[in-house]
Amino acid sequence: MILVTTETIPGHDIRSAIGVVQGNTVRTKHIGRDIGASLKTIVGGEIKGYTDMLNEARAEAMERLRSNAMAAGANAVVNVRFTTADVVGAGAEILAYGTGVVAVPSES
């Protein structure tokens, strides 16, 4: 599965567009991490627990994007984008989306 943030795939021709494909997840951290994060806002700096949470969520959303694209008959996704939203207190949704396409190597 080829995933790109561009409209085209270098070295490939897009034969057909399948349509919008997406993958998402909602993640939270446990109360201990929230307390630590609250204290960190006083002194500043990276909140490592949340960084890890968002990295895990992004990876899961990408895997679900791949699965959704494959189920729709795509072998690539162009214009891949991410968005995030607060869902509950310390919970965040990560959504990965793009256009599923059928791409083949260019003949030239």
Image (tube, helix red, strand yellow):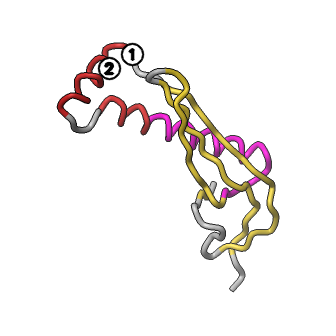
**Residue lying furthest left in this view?**
43
User: Which residue: 71% across, 56% down?
Assistant: 99
Within the image, what quadrant is residue 43 found in?
A: top left
The magenta span reads 56-77
User: Mark 2: which amino acid?
Assistant: Arg
The quadrant of the image that shows the C terminus is bottom right
* Magenta highlight on residue 76: yes
For label 1, the crowd category at 10 Å Cα-Cα, with few meaning under 14, some 14 to 19 and many 20 or more, is: few
Q: Which residue is mark 2?
A: 33
Residue 11 x, y percent position in the rendering: 62, 76
Q: Is residue 50 left or right of residue 45?
A: right
Q: Which mark is residue 14?
A: none
Task: Specify the principal SS of the magenta part.
Answer: helix
Residue 41 x, y percent position in the rendering: 26, 29
User: Label 2's element?
Assistant: helix
Residue 93 x, y percent position in the rendering: 55, 32
The quadrant of the image that shows the N terminus is bottom right
User: Label 1's element?
Assistant: loop
User: Mark 1: which amino acid?
Assistant: His
* Magenta highlight on residue 43: no
Residue 32 x, y percent position in the rendering: 31, 14
Within the image, what quadrant is residue 106 found in?
A: bottom right
Q: Which residue is mark 1?
A: 30
Q: Is residue 36 left or right of residue 108?
A: left
For label 2, the crowd category at 10 Å Cα-Cα, with few meaning under 14, some 14 to 19 and many 20 or more, is: some
Real-space CA distance between mark 1 and mark 2, rounded to the nearest whole angstrom: 6 Å
User: Which residue: 22% across, 38% down?
Assistant: 45
Q: Nearer the viewer, residue 35 or 82?
A: 35
Tags 1 and 2 touching, CB below 8 Å: yes
Q: Is residue 55 left or right of residue 34?
A: right
**Residue lying furthest top in this view?**
31
